Image (cartoon, rainbow, N blue to C red):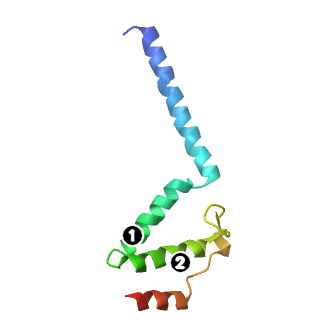
Amino acid sequence: MNDEEKARLDRRRDAREIKKIRKAEDLDRRGIDYERLTEFFFDLCLSWCQFLDVETFLFFINGVFLNITKGNHINVSRFKEINEIEVLSIEFINHLLAYR
């Protein structure tokens, strides 16, 4: 490999590294990617509810979704600001426990 090829490979590696850094910085400015967050949210709920039946699981995941979002329909729902999110009510927890 000659010096020209090495320089070209170094430039490509540097360009990839810069692109990776810019992408990470861009994500930091925008916040978490919605699709990745929903996958994480689903997996988290699944692990919390692994021994529950489907109806209880759906009740739980729907309750959490309604607690952290605002909007009249899933297509137009947006996440609430952190200071707008409240702890799930004791009534919700009791209702959830009643399903068990």
Nearest to N terminus: mark 2 or mark 1:
1
Residue found at x 59% / y 39%: 22
Q: Is residue 21 left or right of residue 58?
A: right
On the image, the x and y values in percent for residue 58 come to: 45, 75
Which residue occupies 46% across, 9% down?
Answer: 4
6 relative to 56, above or below: above
The residue where tag 2 is placed is: 63
Residue closest to the eye, 42 or 53? 53
Tell me: residue 97, above or below residue 39: below
Element class at badge 1: helix
For residue 46, the mark is 1
Q: Name the amino acid, label 1.
A: Leu
Q: Quadrant of residue 72?
A: bottom right
Count of all numbered marks drawn on residues in the image: 2
Kindly identify the amino acid type of the residue bearing the numbered disc 2: Gly
State which quarter of the image contains the N terminus: top left
